[in-house]
């Protein structure tokens, strides 16, 4: 019997979403999935915060540190049984880089290539009320169009009751405008979310194989 395939596709500007994505990928492998970690392309050669030298240096350093991680392609979506999507929050919306990649999925969508695939989302924002749930809900809108199956973490594990966690829509960290600043509770929560995503995808895959 084949192995469940998990793609973790993300955009990160300061390394916070990257840290969550890497933890999700590691947890997916531990859960028995074959995993691809993919980042979406940076759309600008300059930081989105002009004049802030500290922020700009963190952005540049992070971009350099992930240069060897492959960029996401439609083939990664075709390959996957499940996809975990991570994005920085931008005014309560997904970052432009991730949104552009989603916009490019039309050829795959038109041939029903994303139907019944499992999707799960996570995010990071600078502040506690920085549009985290809105970002995830906006990202999930695309999945409805695809006919995909959304798997949230819910409040289905004790880690969701931890002081710095608890978002049932998807793991949401607070960076406080610091690069790679992800609380341990959030890392534990993204591991749980990845396990849950793989578990549901595995059940669906095995069920389809049994019916076939």
Image: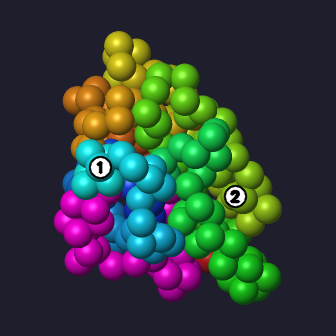
Please name the residue that numbered disc 2 is placed on: 143
Q: Is there any visible trace of residue 158 in the rendered image?
A: no
| Residue 103 on image: x %, y % | 69, 72
Mark 1, other Cα within 10 Å: few <14 / some 14–19 / many ≥20: few
Please give left or right for residue 26 compared with residue 76 in the image. left
The C terminus lies in quadrant: bottom right
Q: Is there any visible trace of residue 68 in the rendered image?
A: yes
| Residue 50 on image: x %, y % | 44, 53
Q: Quadrant of residue 115?
A: bottom right
Please give the label number shown on residue 97: none
The N terminus lies in quadrant: bottom left
Please give the label number shown on residue 53: 1
Q: Is residue 52 magenta?
A: no
Q: Residue at x 40, y 15 (%)?
A: 161
Viewer-proximal residue, 212 or 60? 60
Please give left or right for residue 109 compared with residue 99 in the image. right
Q: Quadrant of residue 117?
A: bottom right
Classify mark 2: helix, strand or loop.
helix
Q: Residue at x 54, y 66 (%)?
A: 97
Q: What's the magenta region?
A: 59-85
Tell me the colour scheme of the image.
Answer: rainbow
Classify mark 1: helix, strand or loop.
helix
Q: Is residue 72 magenta?
A: yes
Q: Compared with residue 19, is residue 83 higher up or lower down, i.e. above or below? A: below
Mark 2, other Cα within 10 Å: few <14 / some 14–19 / many ≥20: many
Q: How many numbered circles are shown?
A: 2
Q: Compared with residue 112, is residue 161 higher up or lower down, i.e. above or below? A: above
1 and 2 marks in contact (CB < 8 Å):
no
Q: Residue at x 74, y 52 (%)?
A: 141
Please give left or right for residue 94 compared with residue 66 in the image. right
Q: Earlier in the sequence, mark 1 or mark 2?
A: 1
């Amino acid at each position: 019997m084949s192995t469940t395939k998990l793609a973790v596709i993300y955009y990160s500007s300061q390394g916070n979403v990257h840290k969550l994505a890497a933890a999700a990928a590691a947890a997916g492998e531990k859960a028995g999935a074959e995993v691809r970690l993919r980042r979406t392309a940076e759309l600008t050669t300059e930081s989105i915060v002009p004049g802030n030298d500290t922020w700009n240096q963190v952005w540049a350093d992070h971009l350099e540190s992930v240069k060897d991680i492959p960029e996401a392609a439609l083939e990664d979506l075709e390959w996957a049984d499940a996809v975990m999507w991570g994005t920085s929050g931008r005014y309560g919306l997904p970052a432009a880089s991730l949104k552009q990649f989603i916009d490019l999925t039309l050829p795959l969508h038109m041939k029903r290539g994303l139907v019944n695939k499992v999707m799960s989302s996570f995010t990071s924002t600078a502040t506690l009320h920085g549009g985290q749930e809105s970002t995830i809900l906006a990202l999930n809108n695309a999945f409805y169009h695809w006919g995909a199956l959304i798997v949230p973490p819910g409040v289905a594990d004790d880690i969701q009751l931890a002081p710095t966690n608890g978002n049932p829509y998807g793991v949401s960290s607070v960076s406080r405008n610091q690069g790679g600043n992800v609380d341990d509770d959030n890392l534990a929560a993204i591991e749980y979310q990845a396990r849950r995503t793989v578990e549901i995808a595995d059940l669906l895959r095995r069920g389809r194989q049994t019916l076939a």
